[in-house]
Structures are given as structure tokens and as C-alpha cells.
Amino acid sequence: TALKLGMIPADGIGKEVLPAAQRVLEALGSSIPKTTFIPLKAGWEEFNKNGKALPEETIKILKEECDGAMFGSVSSPSHKVEGYSSPIVALRKHLDLYSNVRPVSSIKIPNQKSYHQCDMVIVRENTECLYIKKEELEIDSKDGSKKAIAYRQITSKASSRIGKMAFEIALRRGKEREIAKKSGKSVWWNGEPKVTIVHKSNVLSVTDGLFRESVRAIKEGTDRYNGVKMEEQLVDSMVYRMFREPEIFDVAVAPNLYGDIISDGAAALVGSLGLVPSINAGDDFVMGEPVHGSAPDIEGQNIANPIASIRSAALLLSSLGYVEPAARINEAVDAVLSEGQYLTPDLGGKSSTTDVTDAILKRL
Ligand code: NAI
Ligand code: MG
């Protein structure tokens, strides 16, 4: 067998960190099947050049030829631009990548300002909530004042499947911790696996209420998750507790927008957005993607941290079934981080994107 991976760097530092991930994948050599990388177009720059943020060709190749993909980051403008719509949001819909799985774990890095013990996975619903982008603007005929309305969609179907994903991940992590303990490794979380449902049902009882009930029903409807504890946290207090005692969280499951927000917060806890990977996963397709955006403040300087992207490639591999090579990548990354000799400026270092990637390759 051979692997075909679609590579969509898109904009900004996506164009710097995605090639770094590709170099790491290439360095795995024969420990993964022979891999072809197919460069694909999307993004704000692409929109300005050819009028389409997500060309048909890109979707077609992903669907018909690729076993998986990697996405960099896109520079979406903060104001409305006629004809433009975020290609990553669209891709998640086109490929039905209904879950966004974001492991956030800390590692001790020399000279780090603050260190928080954290090893959690944020499971973000990826297709609905406010991201259906149904917005309306009304202008008052009398005084010209404006009223903007956004629709938020929560369905039992999407909430149940993301809930199931969260419980499955909690179950798997529980097993992985047992194996690690048996082999003498230390694990932080000694309690039973746990899923925390993040919502705001006290205010939004219809929408968030449906999310909460649908996720709860996943555990209540079967014996399969008897060993997994279920807790709830209102999204605002979730942020508070995550910053005070991040070590108490195992798996958190959230509707789209809350999931987006708490993941950037969690990234701050572990030192940098440049460290946090994700996969967008559906039943038929997986796409790796660093959690961060296109970082216009540092683009083009070869100083972006490539680790989020490299760890995303590892997540992609392991979800395609190549668990061992994925673990090798993560071990190499951990070694470079804990050694602290090659760190990008976001972690207080002076190394470039290329230096850090080279150091990881050397470890591999
Ligand atoms: P951002 O994630 O691009 O940057 C936030 C801060 O983190 C910046 O100071 C940046 O320099 C730093 N940072 C991010 N990734 C880093 C890395 N790998 N290494 C070192 N430092 C890193 O978020 P921001 O600035 O709010 O958004 C910039 C653009 O990115 C916007 O156009 C936004 O729409 C887009 N965006 C795209 C996403 C995607 O493609 N999935 C996700 C989030 C934002
Ligand atoms: Mg985000």
C-alpha cells in the first residue's frame, strides 16, 4: 500500500510550518508506507489571486485521491468580504469532519516562565453552533439603527456523535494510562477516565440544553462507558477552573465556539499556541491542523514554532493506524523541548523554524 496526503499550507505561517511537518513525515522512511504529498490550494491569498478561497479542484482531489490531509492556517479577514468564506470551515463541512480533537499536554521546558501540569483532550464539535454562519442585518426604517442576528444551530445528531467520540477517547486514554503505569511510566491522572461536558445551559437551555442532554444520553444509554466518569462545567467557570487547576481535566467536550475558545486558553497554559495540534476527523477522512492561525505578526520570518504542525502530522498518522511512527515523532519532539537547546521565540528561545525542525529530524 501507498499513502496519498493532501497538503494545504494556505496562508501566513501555514506556509512555513506545513513544510516542516512534511519533512518530518518524509524522514520516517520505510516505517510508513511510501507517501506522496499532493500540494493543494486554498486560503485568503488564493481568493485574492483566483477568486476562490476553496477551489473545486482541492475538494475533488481530497475526496477522490487522498487518504488524509494536512492543513496549515488561513488568514480570514475580520470584516465581511463579498464572495469570501473561510476555507477551513468549508472543508470541515464538505468532508464531514465532525470532530476536532485537540490534545493539550504540558512538558517541562527549561527556563519556562510558568509551568502547569496539564494533560487533557478538548473535543470540539466541528460542523454547527454559530459556525453555520447564518447572520442577518436589519436596519431600522425610522432611525437607521442596526440590529445583527446570528443563528446558532445545535442538533441531537451532531451532539451525540461528538459525545460518543469524547467517551471513546476517554476510554482509550484510560487504557493507555493503564499500559503506561504497568510499564513503570508515571502518569498524572490517577483517577478513572473522565468526560467534562462544557456548556451554558443555565442561560441557553434550548440549544446548550440539547447539547448537554445528547452527550449525557451517550453514557446513560450503554454499559460501555461505565468506567468513564461524566461531569459538567459551565463554559465560563470551565475557563476559570482550567486556569486554576488544569490537572483535573481529562477529556472535555464542547460545542463548536466554546471548544474553539477554551483550546486557545489551554494552549496558553502549556506555553504556546505553537505547541497544540489537532485533527479534524469524520468517519471517512482525517485532516491534521495546528490549532493556531496564520500569525501575521510573525509570518515570513522563519520563527514560527513548527511543533503544533509536526504533532498534528503525528496525530494524523496515528488515526490512520500508524501508531508506532506517530509515537516516534512525539518522542523526538518531547526530547527537543525538554532539552531546551532549540526553541523558537514563543518559548523564549532564539531558534528558527528550520533549526527546531532540524533538531527534531536529528532525534528521529
Ligand atoms: P493566531 O493563532 O494566528 O495568533 C495568535 C498569537 O499566537 C500571535 O501572537 C501569534 O504570533 C502566536 N502564534 C500562533 N501560532 C504560532 C506559532 N506556530 N509559533 C509562534 N507563535 C504563534 O491568531 P490571530 O492572530 O487571532 O489570527 C490571525 C489570523 O489567523 C486571522 O486571520 C484568523 O482568521 C486566522 N485564524 C485561522 C485559523 C485556522 O486557519 N484554522 C485559526 C485561528 C485564526
Ligand atoms: Mg481557534
Image (spheres, grey):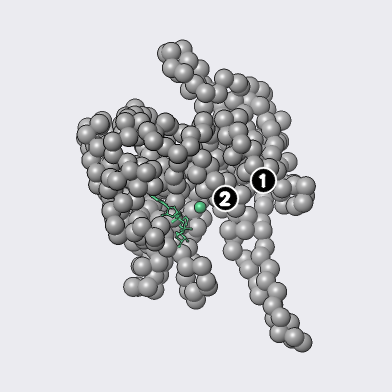
> Can you tell me whether the CB of the residue at mark 2 lies under 8 Å from the nearest atom of ligand 2?
yes
Where is residue 25 drawn, in percent x and y?
28, 40
**Residues at badges 2 and 1 in contact (C-beta under 8 Å)?**
yes
Q: Residue at x 77, y 51 (%)?
A: 203
Where is residue 301 drawn, in percent x and y?
29, 57
Q: Which mark is residue 306?
A: none
The three-letter amino acid code for the residue at tag 1 is: Val
Q: Quadrant of residue 165?
A: top right
Considering only vertical position in the picture, is 165 above or below 175?
below
Q: Quadrant of the N terminus?
A: top left
Q: Residue at x 55, y 50 (%)?
A: 260
Q: Residue at x 22, y 34 (%)?
A: 362
Q: Nearer the viewer, residue 58 or 64?
A: 58
Q: Which mark is residue 235?
A: 1
Where is residue 95 drawn, in percent x and y?
47, 52
Q: Is residue 143 left or right of residue 67?
A: right
User: At numbered mark 2, what does the secondary structure look like: helix, strand or loop?
Assistant: helix
The three-letter amino acid code for the residue at tag 2 is: Ile
Q: Nearer the viewer, residue 282 or 215?
A: 215
Q: Residue at x 53, y 42 (%)?
A: 266
Q: Which mark is residue 261?
A: 2
Considering only vertical position in the picture, is 234 above or below 31?
below
Q: Is residue 139 left or right of residue 63?
A: right
Considering only vertical position in the picture, is 234 above or below 94?
above
Where is residue 110 drawn, in percent x and y?
37, 33
Specify which label sits upstream in the sequence, 2 or 1: 1
- Distance from Cα at disc 2 to Cα at disc 1: 10 Å
